[in-house]
Each structure stands twice: as C-alpha cells, then as structure tokens.
Image: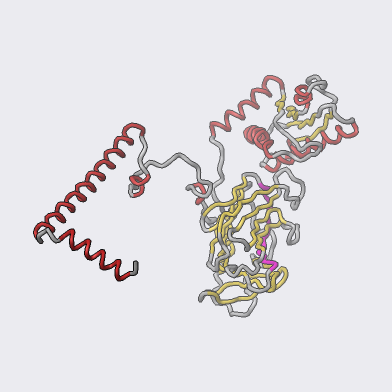
Amino acid sequence: MDKKRLLSALILIVGLSVAPLSAQGILGRIANRVKEQVTDKIEQKVDKVVDETIDEVLDGTKSKSADADNNDAEVEDTYDPQAGAAKNDFVRGGVVMFEDNMQGEQVGEFPSKWDLVRGNAEIATIQGQKCIALIDGDGWITPLVKGGIKNYLGDVFTVEYDMLYDDRAKDGAPNIEIDFMHETERRDNEIFTVNYYMGHDKQTIDCDYVRPTDEGWTSKEGHTSAHECCVINDGRWHHFALSFNKRALKFYVDGKRVVNVPNAKAGAGWMTIWSGGMEKRPTYVKNVVIAKGAVELYERQETDIDAKVAAVEKAIAETGKFVTNNILFETGKTTLKQESMVEIQRVADYMKKNPTTRFEVQGHTDNQGSDAVNDPLSQQRAEAVVKALEGLGVDGFNLKAVGKGSHEPVADNKTDEGRAKNRRVEFVKK
C-alpha cells in the first residue's frame, strides 16, 4: 500500500471513530482521561515516598534518589586515600630566608637570585607573569642564599614553588627533581629527593631518602611513591611544597599531602631544582620561598612515651640491662629494617629522660654461619644501632657498640624459636 492510500485509510478510521460523538462528548472524554492520568501519577509518587520511608525505618537505609539532594545524608564509613584534613596540614616556616617572585627581573637574562648548576635557565613571561624558564632539556639551578653557602637549610625548614608545564600535545615531557644535599656533597648526591615525570595522563610523585640508620649522605635506601596522585602537566600553574622537621619529610601538591615519610635522615644543607630530558618546551618556575620552621612534628602521646620508657626502666632496675628481639636487620646485612625504629625510639626516649646513663650496645647472632662471619656482623649491627640512636638525638658519648657474635646464646640454637631468641640486641647499663 502506498503512502497516500495509507493516509486516506487512517483518516477514514479516525473519522468513523469520532463521527458519532459531539464536541462536548469529546471534551468530556479528554477531561476524564487527564484526571485518570493525574490520579495515577499522584498515587505512584505517594507509594514511592511511603516505601522509602518504611525501608528507612526498618533497616536504616535510604534510597539513592532520596540521598541525592540531602546534604545531611548518612555517609558510609570508608577511607579515601586522596582525601582527609590531615593531608592539608602544610604551614610555611615562620622565618623566610629566601624568596623570589621574579619581580624586577629582565626577560631573557639569568635570574639574579639563583646560580647555575648545569644547563641553562632564563627569565621568561608566561600568562603575563615573570618566571624562570628551565630550558635546553637540562636546566639545573640553586638558590643564592647568604652569598651561596651550602649549609642554610638546617633540620627544620619548608620549601615552596609554583611550576607549569604543558604536555597536552602528548609529544614528550621532562623529569623534574627537587634535590637536597648535605653541605659536603655535590649536586645529584642527595640526602633526599622528590621527583616526578611530567608525561602520562596522571603523574606519580616519588621520594628517595637516606634513612637515619644509613651511613653517609647518599645511599637513599628509603623510598616511597604516590602513584598517579595528581595532574600537573596541563599547562596550568600548580603549587608544590615540602616540609622537613628533624626526621619527618612531607611533600604537597596543590595543598594535598602526597608524601609522608616518618623517619628520614636529617642534615640537608642546600638544594637544587632540575628539569631534564625535554628540549621542545621549557619548564617554568616562580614564587620560590624557603623558610625556617616546618609542619609540627607528630609525636606519640606523652602517656604512651612514659609507658614505653617505664618498660626499659623496669628491665634495667631488675636485671641491669634491656634485652630486645624487636631490632631487626636485613638477612646477612647490617641494614636495620624500618620497623626496628619503634624499639630504638623507646631506648632513645629512656636515654633522653636519663641523660647520664651509659649503655654498652651488644649485638648477638645465632650460630648459623661461622664465627669469622658472625663476629664482625654482630659488631657492625651494634654500631648501626648506635648510629640510629645518635640520629634520634642521643649523645654518642654514652654509647659503646660491642659485637658478641654467637658466643652468648640464651636459648637452644637447634630450633628456629631458639635461634630467634638468640638474635637480639642488649643494652647493658655501665
């Protein structure tokens, strides 16, 4: 059937269906139909509200639609690793010792408040604001503080800066580092460093640091990573901040804390900022501020400290020594495991409370291996514990490291349990 014939048939059907009806009858049927639909809609709404109310009363739940517009809706007890007030705790140090907002600088010249470590850098204007452009794929600069000295940071400080890089074209991006060196070390020999690659859709922030128990200033066995925690390569300015307080290292991106290291080695003297590996576009930096002071150091509750110190005091009062199996090392090495710092901190707290106490720090091993291996290993492990205590503020004059090897067992070396008891550290009062 063609379209015209189909249309004619439809008109005929409609005409037959309404022909017997008067205009008044048609209007009446329409009014009745509207009334029926309105009544049905109201009943459906009432039923829905009643059902949701009953559910809420019976099992304490709310429907998703009810919560959508309710600011007081109950929130599930879940942990969001990217949220929380504790992640926004940055406070600039109280005494500014270096600040550069680039005002008064001449575009195209090297920034007057900085020194060149390697590569190239110059003043530029981006989005109407003066800044430092790190160019040629290897821009490495350091602040000129007090004439260029390298011991200005100390053990409590903050660093802030703004940075911009545009990788929306996805055609290559640089690596960024903010590096901190001991005053005796050269660039790239960091006591700790924060680095991030400006490529990919989201950026990962890495931090490598020297642990308090590590020898020297550049071993950097400590590591933490905030995986894909931010987007900072979008051609916008982003704010970065670092806080170091005696041992606590924290790093923030746009006000959100992404790195939180509880025990890093103190002793940073100077710092550098580096952008490397991308020659097509510069990395831009502005508003650099270095200040003395830092985010408040998180300490255990005083009652907790007292309780742990009391345990050491009790052991020494009863036996003249404090013996622990909770100071652990990497297998066959002198490297302290991070969990050992809890016990070492306990001893440090005791010694600070009793500053005239002197300890012989004895390292003991099981009998696995020869004396030629175990004797020097136990000595070096005892020395590692002494260094860790010194790193926590204990006077090294009151400590003497002694390796006992496997010569003084306290349990049977034929069993795993016995060997575990023999692997111990003793703090013998002298």
Could you say which quadrant of the image residue 233 lies in? bottom right
- Answer with left or right where residue 373 lies relative to residue 125: right
Q: At 60% across and 72% down in the image, what residue appears?
A: 132
Image location (x, y in percent) of residue 296 = 54, 47
Vertically, is 245 above or below 105? above
- Residue 355 seen from this side: no
Of 404 and 370, the residue lying toward us = 370
Q: Quadrant of the C terminus?
A: top right
- Residue 367 seen from this side: yes
Image location (x, y in percent) of residue 242 = 59, 55
Of 115 and 95, the residue lying toward us = 115
Q: Is residue 269 magenta?
A: yes
Q: At 22% across and 44% down in the image, what residue appears?
A: 43
Image: magenta residue range: 264-277
Q: At 78% across and 24% down in the image, what residue appears?
A: 416
Vertically, is 170 above or below 89? below
Of 240 and 182, the residue lying toward us = 240
Q: At 68% across and 73% down in the image, what residue appears?
A: 279
Image location (x, y in percent) of residue 60 = 36, 34
